[in-house]
Image (spheres, rainbow, N blue to C red):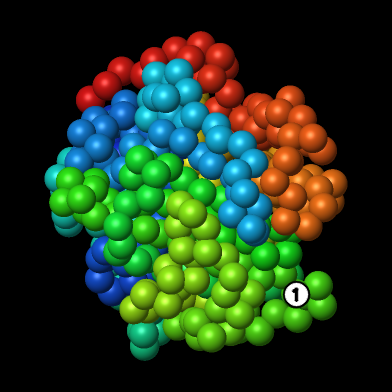
Amino acid sequence: MKALIAGGGIGGMTMALRLHHAGIDMEVFESVVEIRELGVGINLLPHATRELTELGLLEDLAATAIETRALSYHTQYGHHIITEPRGLAAGYKWPQFSINRGSLLMILAEAARDRIGAERVHAGHHLDAFSQDADGVTAHFVHPQNGEAVAECRGDLLIGADGIHSRVREILHPGEGLPNFSGITMLRGVTEQEPFFDGRTMIVAGTWNERMVVYPISEAARKKGRSLINWVAEIRDESKVLRKRDNWSRIGIKADFLPAFADWHFDCLDMPRLIEDNDVAYDFPMVDREPLERWSFGRVTLLGDAAHPMYPSGSNGAAQAILDASVLSDILVKTDSIEDALIAYQNARMAPTANVVLSNRDFLAERVLRLVDERCPANCKNIHDFVTREEMEQFSRDYQRIAGFDKDSLDAKPSLKSV
């Protein structure tokens, strides 16, 4: 069996590693001309870390990422709402990591090149078209810059792991159109400063309309007594007029965001200073797509953001792609028919990921901020007089269950055989 993987991002590279571990041949085709370390921060929750640990990557992750030990919620005035332990500190068997997205991708890419061979990882190959018959799939690739044909490859199945603008999804579901805009525009950046709290805490602060998410992402910086801090500033525009739908790496204009956060000088962290001290920040619209009724067509299927792009609320986008790869590789090993395997994979993952997409659209993971904003008077310090701890903790429990990382269920899953 040979799989063709369109897309060499987090989902695609994890898929390649899982297939290799399962003894299945594959090749990876990535659109970008050079796979390199780019991006801002990302979180790996315990269910994702578990899968990467089983692939033998825990040591590399721990050497690069911050082991996140707490998530602390605050109002826009800096008042503490609630703090939740995370990862090992919450009793999980696997840590939660905060890491630069580019660093995570390079860990995966280097492992893939080492294990499957660099000659099987093709950069500068953008999927243009494919055809399938009873015996396999033929994929046609072009250069992403000039559109000239660069390769034709034959395999037994094609996995579309090519992101929110997936060409595979576009072919399988023509006429779908542009992603759905939430009304929220994000400014994202990384700033090196002195550590806050214990150097391992994530902060989510603000309201339904204006929010900041802040967390350190570099173990190397922490060891030097510094903190490389990933931050996201979010502003909601209820008119939902989306500019720049086709540009996902636009250099942001900090002056467009700073006024909304100018007074957010917390005891633990100066939010406007994070924005001001940053060299380069990026402007992103928060978007998703409607859950699909079908991922798999014959010998072709979707994975990760190509299958279920979601809002970054809850830190679950990359995790769900990693879980997709785990489920699909396990099913392929156990099923003789590729077509049946892809349907079984679709049936196993489509409903759970749709639930995460809809929960993220409702901001369930951060619903506590809205509840506090609705119930508490302005600049209220006695928050627990208006919102109980049980109400706050219930949001977290509900989201953990929906996203698949409630501790009891995760701990009960049988362990894979490590590499």
> Which quadrant, please, contains the C terminus?
top left
Say which of 285 and 98 sits in front. Answer: 98
Q: Give the percent coordinates (x, y) of residue 120.
A: 23, 54
Residue 319 visible in image: yes
Residue 327 visible in image: no
Q: Which residue is pictured at 54% across the width and 42% down the height?
A: 72
Amino acid beneath label 1: Asp
Q: Which residue is pictured at 51% across the width and 40% down the height?
A: 71
From this view, report whether residue 347 is shown above or below residue 179: above
Number of numbered tags placed on the structure image:
1
Q: Residues within 10 Å of mark 1 (few under 14, many from 20)?
A: some
Q: Give the percent coordinates (x, y) of residue 293.
A: 75, 47
**Left/right of residue 33 with respect to residue 362 in the rendered view:** left
**Residue indicated by mark 1:** 237
User: Which of the 4 image quadrants contains residue 111?
Assistant: top left
**Left/right of residue 181 with respect to residue 283 in the rendered view:** right
Q: Which residue is pictured at 71% across the width and 28% down the height?
A: 389
Secondary structure under the numbered disc 1 in the rendered image: loop
Say which of 85 and 400 sits in front. Answer: 85
Say which of 177 and 202 sits in front. Answer: 202
Q: Which residue is pictured at 78% across the width and 52% down the height?
A: 373
From this view, report whether residue 344 is shown above or below residue 378: above
Q: Give the percent coordinates (x, y) of residue 1.
A: 36, 37
Q: Give the percent coordinates (x, y) of residue 33.
A: 28, 74
